[in-house]
Structure formats: C-alpha cells, structure tokens
Image (tube, grey):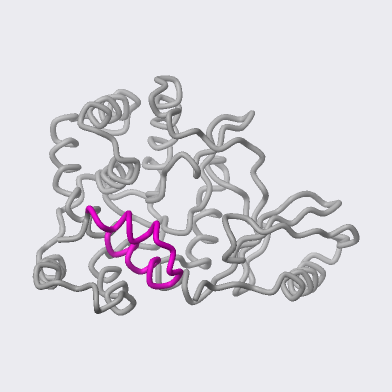
Amino acid sequence: MPFRINAGLVQSELQQLIEQHSPAVKTAGFRLLPVAGLTGESWKISSPAGDFLARHQSAQRQVSGADRQRESAILRHIARHKLGPRVRLYSPPWLIVDWVDGTPLEEQAFTDASVRNALCERLVTLHQLPPSGYRLDLQQQFARYWQHIDRRRLTPRWLRLHHQMLSQVPPSPLKLALVHMDIHAGNVLNTPQGLRLIDWEYAANADIALELAALIRGNYWNEQQQRVFLYEYVKAGGYQNLSLLQQQVNRWIPWVNYLMLMWFEVRWQQTGENQYSEWAHPLRP
C-alpha cells in the first residue's frame, strides 16, 4: 500500500519542530500543502517567515536510496554555489529547506540550445566542487533493491543478470565528483537567478560519466541528443576529451539500465501503480 501521512498530524509535528528549533519564527498563519503526489512525504510550508519545503524520511524512501541526512549534508556542502535549496533544519525524520520559486522545465525544453547550455554550466559547476563524504555504491543499492521486489516477476535471465551485476567490477571513474543522479525536467527549475536543481535525495560522489549516463537514459535521449549534450558539456569545461567521455558513458549505460529497472520494480511493489511496471517492462531481461 502507498505510504501516507495524516495531514493534521504532520502540521502539528512540523509546527512543534519549527517552534522548538526556530522560536523566532511565528507559526501563526502556518499552512501545509502536499507536494509531489499523494505519498505525503514532501510538504510546502507557507508562513509569514517565508515558504519552505519539508521532506520526510520514510522507510520506503530509504529503501529507494534516499537519505535525508546525506541530502542535508550535501545541500550544505554546495550552499554558496546556489545550485539547490538552502537547508533550514534537519531533525530526523524531517529535512526542511527553502522553497525554490521557479518553473519546472517542460520535457521539450532540452531541445533548446540555451537550456542545454545553461544545464551544462550548472553540471560543470557541480562536478568541479570538492567531493562530499558520501560515495555511491551501485552494487550495494542493487542488493538493497533486491530485497524489496516482487519475487513472482523474476525470470532465469533476470537472475543471471542480477548475479552478473553484483559480481562484475564497475568502470573505474573517469573523474570522481559530486553528482545529482536524478536530473529530469521536473527537477530543473527556471528561476530569475538561472537554473536550479531540486530533489537532491540521490546525490553522492560518483563518476561524472555515470551522472551523464543517468541523465541520458533517464530522459530517453536518442543518439543524436546524447552526442549534442556531451559535446556541449565538454565545451562548457566539464571534461577535455569528448571521445573518452563518450566511451565511459557507454560503459555506464548497462549499469544505469539496471538501476532504473530495479528502482521501477521497487516503486511498483511499494505503490501498486501500473506506470512503474510499464516503465520497467522494456528494461526487463
């Protein structure tokens, strides 16, 4: 069954939390609105002190790889570069950040050269920052996902693929950097200050080529769109050798495909929503 939180309890809990940690913030006129579907895990807080986003750490999100403590630390790590929202409070199970005013990109926005260039510049800035203290371990994530998928959906080919993904050595990083790992149109906001990235719950240290492979596969870009974006990323200063970068992205593609498959399967098991099963289908071995 989908995870849901009682709105009244959430409002009371968040009011108490803010009053306890920020007594100067008055909660009169405090209002909550659910964000990102009906799971009840993210809430917009509207108050006289400003607008904020409260993100809950549920067991379901932890299974999917989210970690609010890591997210909080990484957002603080990048704060002065204004790549993401500012952290206001981390008090388990809640992370409260500034609400970023902006408009999510449309899917077709990535076909616009100015948008691609701006996104490349944001990515280059991110990938040039000192790494955080959190390293992404894909095989550990695969093993965690494995415990939360529907066993009735397994096939012999899938079992063989899973063992293969756990036993083979991942590609050696071309460049280890801080990566976002969930860049799609809905997580890129157009703001008066330029493009900003939201939803940093999967961010960690990893190969820049893994980030680019996830961006390419997650947005279902064709070969031409892929080549154009990688060229513009290199041109923006992200990496010097386009040929090597393309080769490394190609090495990571099977890993990203399996990551997507496992994530879709876990979310289908958690929510029962058919869209996740539909998205998983073309990736199934």
Tell me if residue 225 comes above or below residue 169 in the rendering: above
Tell me if residue 106 comes above or below residue 149 in the rendering: above
Tell me if residue 175 comes above or below residue 73 in the rendering: above
Number of numbered labels in the structure image: 0
Q: Position of residue 102 (x, y in %)?
A: 63, 36
Q: Residue at x 37, y 51 (%)?
A: 181
Residue 277 in the magenta stretch? The answer is yes
Q: Position of residue 26 (x, y in %)?
A: 88, 60
Overall secondary structure of the magenta stretch?
A: helix
* Quadrant in the picture for the C terminus: bottom left
| Residue 65 location, quadrant | bottom left
Q: Residue at x 72, y 70 (%)?
A: 7
Residue 34 in the magenta stretch? The answer is no
| Residue 228 location, quadrant | top left
Q: Residue at x 40, y 56 (%)?
A: 275
Tell me if residue 247 comes above or below residue 210 in the rendering: above
Q: Nearer the viewer, residue 48 or 174?
A: 48
**Residue at the farthest top position:** 113
Q: Residue at x 46, y 39 (%)?
A: 185
Q: Position of residue 192 (x, y in %)?
A: 64, 28
Q: Position of residue 211 (x, y in %)?
A: 31, 46
Q: Nearer the viewer, residue 177 or 213?
A: 213
The residues colored magenta run: 261-282
Q: Nearer the viewer, residue 238 or 202?
A: 202
In-image side of 152 versus 188 (left or right):
left
**Residue at the farthest right position:** 28
In-image side of 84 versus 157 (left or right):
right
